[in-house]
Image (cartoon, rainbow, N blue to C red):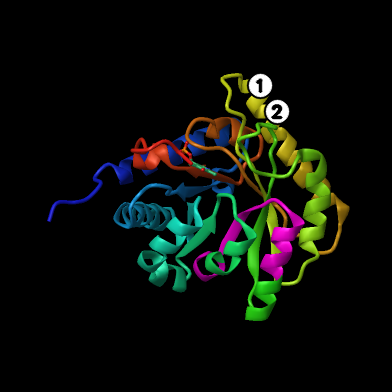
Amino acid sequence: MPTECPGIPARLAAVHDRVADAARAAGRDPREVRVLLATKTQDAETVLAGVRAAVDLAAAAGDVRPVLVGENRVQELVAKAPALADLVGAGKVEAHLIGHLQKNKVNQVLAAATAVDSVDSLALATALSTRCQRDGRALDVLVQVNVSGEASKSGVAPDEAGALAVDVAALPGLRLAGFMTIGARSDDEALVRAGFARLRAVRDAVLASGAPGTRDARELSMGMTGDLELAVAEGATVVRVGTAVFGARPTPAR
Ligand SMILES: *Cc1c(COP(=O)(O)O)cnc(C)c1O
């Protein structure tokens, strides 16, 4: 049988090189920045090829942390969950939801995800908390912030993000691990960077608050194929990459 997706390992290695170069340029340790595989529209086989490439790269670097995989839609997350179940069960892969979540899909998402990176309301967080308590489990969450103010993007407004994060952090069954944003869709690098800097400022304020449950809220998930260098320069701890690893998507994103 021919090897599927022969380009993925090389492309993933190139992404890691981009991240490492950007980190060094910013005076950061490249290991502070992880790459999450954004897998929307890719079939399970392609996702697995990406995961295997990531496992190999991590092993070569002596990195024992799990590989991060992110899906936008609950339906896709659920559909691909069986292909990843063994790896997730073994602690080798974390499956994140990185797209908008409706409250009525909380049960479905909890059956398939190890983390929800797109918490944007207290109502949603409360629904996740209630369900996690009932199941006796803990869930890592990020608060998604709309730093660009673009109407097409989900996320809480930057002005309200700190208060939401403090409320989320206090909910049982949830562990606030940090913040997520999608950068402004713009060629103006200063504008994009300012948005990422805004997310970092939100994070720093929440960490400094000392509010219950906020101590672990260190992650900054920001930066994608087109803007990951800017995000790393502004402190990203996770970049979410699809196109640069898997190639252009057959259908428009979303
Ligand atoms: C699609 C997507 C990504 C990856 O985008 P690319 O430009 O393909 O790297 C990252 N984060 C989210 C939330 C996405 O929807």
Q: Identify the residue at image location x=36%, y=51%.
A: 50
Dot 2 corresponds to which residue?
A: 194
User: SS for tag 2?
Assistant: helix
Foreground residue among 35 and 171: 171
Q: CA distance from mark 2 to mark 1?
A: 6 Å
Q: Is residue 208 visible?
A: yes
Asked if ligand 1 lies within 8 A of label 2, the reply is no
User: SS for tag 1?
Assistant: helix
Q: Callout 2: 10 Å neighbours few (<14), some, many (20+)?
A: some
Single out the residue that lies furthest toward the front: 104
Label disc, if present, on residue 44 of the rendered structure: none
Foreground residue among 247 and 20: 247
Q: Is residue 126 magenta?
A: yes
State the image coordinates of residue 84 (x, y, percent, origin top left): 39, 65
Indicate the quadrant where residue 105 lies: bottom right
Indicate the quadrant where residue 55 lies: bottom left
Q: Is residue 203 above or below residue 126?
A: above
Q: Is residue 177 magenta?
A: no
Say which amino acid is labelled 2: Ala
Q: Callout 1: 10 Å neighbours few (<14), some, many (20+)?
A: few
Dot 1 corresponds to which residue?
A: 190
Say which amino acid is labelled 1: Ala
Which contiguous range is marked in magenta?
110-129
Quadrant including the N terminus: bottom left
Q: Across the whole image, how many numbered discs are drawn on residues?
A: 2
Q: Is residue 228 above or below residue 207?
A: above
State the image coordinates of residue 71 (x, y, percent, origin top left): 48, 53
Mark 2 and 1 residues: CB-CB less than 8 Å, in contact? yes
Q: Is residue 207 left or right of residue 101?
A: right
Q: Identify the residue at image location x=45%, y=63%.
A: 78
State the image coordinates of residue 62 (x, y, percent, origin top left): 45, 58
